[in-house]
Amino acid sequence: MDDRAKRIVETAVALAERDGYQAVRLRDVAATAQVALGTVYKRFASKEEILIAALEQEVDKLVARIGKKPVPGDTPQERIHFVFSAVSKGLLRRPNLGKALVRSIASGDPNITERVASFHGVITALVMTAIRGGTPTDPGTWGGDADERERTIASILQNVWFSSFVGWAGGLHEASQLLTDVDKTAELLLPA
Amino acid sequence: MDDRAKRIVETAVALAERDGYQAVRLRDVAATAQVALGTVYKRFASKEEILIAALEQEVDKLVARIGKKPVPGDTPQERIHFVFSAVSKGLLRRPNLGKALVRSIASGDPNITERVASFHGVITALVMTAIRGGTPTDPGTWGGDADERERTIASILQNVWFSSFVGWAGGLHEASQLLTDVDKTAELLLPA
DNA sequence: TCGCAAAATAGAACACGTTTCACTTCTTTT
DNA sequence: AAAAGAAGTGAAACGTGTTCTATTTTGCGA
């Protein structure tokens, strides 16, 4: 990502953080990033793609923060709690940004399908590492039949988390319910 | 809902079904429904609200179809499969409509929070009935402490279903994965 | 039936995502 | 250093959601 693209994404993040999705007006983004509107569209195909780029940036920061060390916690439950807590933190601390990103993720835009899939993939990898313990960015020993159950559990946890995240973004419940939902699910799915 | 409002929603459904969310152009809706644009906005605050009204109509049809009889199936798993199958059917059979409705549900628009909550409430009720067996529209004996576990399970199942639904709408996977995800979750959560 | 308030209408107007275009400014190649 | 092409710019223009207004139509109580 070149300099201009970085400024564009940073500006979009700042605007989303301050006043939410609808405040990310591309004319304002362009002006604030000191770039022409046409340049914005030379870098990004749409507003959604700018926000997805912002999401990727957040994910990169997250992985840089927690990906290098083994997931802390003595039980799968504790480690799962830690991972989802870390994932949620950045998004909940800036609610307007978080809601704007959810909206993009859930927009259904076919042009961003791959990047949304990649986002889900990163979360899945983190959760699987949390279940069995270890370091997220280590390949470890994956792929065997015995992983099937863990993969299913990771997928369920991620679905619960994501759905609850969307619910929070839509005003259905408080942020605290995110971790409550995940914890309850982990409790039922994992041997004590 | 008066006559004009009905025509508006019907038209929106028809357009969404044919060509998806972006094809629900309110000028077209108005013209096809033989109504002025201003009239559309007297009935509905926004495009999202029209689509949410369409969702409510679908939900009503669903409840009319499966709400009066006991949920069929001898085990909770079978009954859960039946309920989610029924819920998904109407939306998957008309994929463009389904995707348009998901988009509205997940839009995060605060003006529709209550109606989205009500939608989730209906699904939850159906699922809880499926878990213990019985007739959805019967009050039955709810609310005790012993229901807590069932309520949690229902909520998890619903979250998994919804998240998978959003994933399908975004092109992440095939429609068939919806029921696969739910079945796997039910298998892990419920005593055999 | 008359008169009036509410509802509906046609159409203009505005906001913002997106596209297009004519022009300028870099960068690279020779 | 000059030419050529790539990238950036400013501004206009288009589509569609949303709002506004002036006018007409409708329904209803007197």
Image: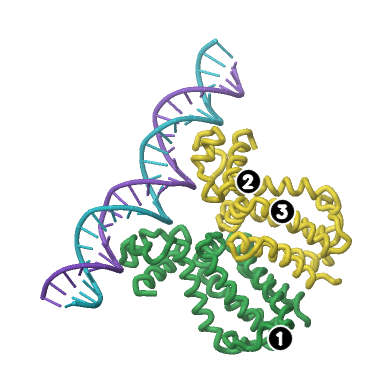
Chain colours: A yellow, B green, C purple, D cyan
The CA span between labels 2 and 1 is 46 Å
Circle 1 — which element? Answer: loop
Q: Residue at x 54, y 32 (%)?
A: A34
Q: Chain of mark 1?
A: B
At label 3, the amino acid type is: Lys
What x and y, as percent, mark residue B35? 31, 65
Q: Which labelled disc corresponds to residue A89?
A: 3
Q: Position of residue A182 (x, y in %)?
A: 74, 65
Sequence-wise, which precedes: disc 2 or disc 3?
2
Image disc number at residue A187: none
Q: Residues within 10 Å of mark 3 (few under 14, many from 20)?
A: some
Work out whether residue A74 can be spotted.
Answer: yes
Residue located 57% across and 44% down the image: A15
Instruction: Say what secondary structure mark 3 lies in.
Output: helix
For badge 1, the amino acid type reads: Thr
Q: Amino acid at mark 2?
A: Ala
Q: Which residue is mark 2?
A: A53
Residues marked 2 and 3 touching at CB (< 8 Å)? no
Quarter of the figure with the N terminus of chain A? top right
Quadrant that contains the C terminus of chain A: bottom right
* Disc 1 packing (10 Å; few <14; some 14–19; many ≥20): some
Is B2 above or below relative to A111?
A: below
Residue at mark 1: B75
On the rendered structure, is A46 left or right of B2? right
Label 3: chain letter = A
Circles 2 and 1, Cβ within 8 Å, touching? The answer is no
Left or right, residue A68 beside residue B176: right
Count the marks.
3
Q: Chain of mark 2?
A: A
Q: Nearer the viewer, mark 3 or mark 1?
A: 3
Which of the 4 image quarters holds residue A166? Answer: bottom right
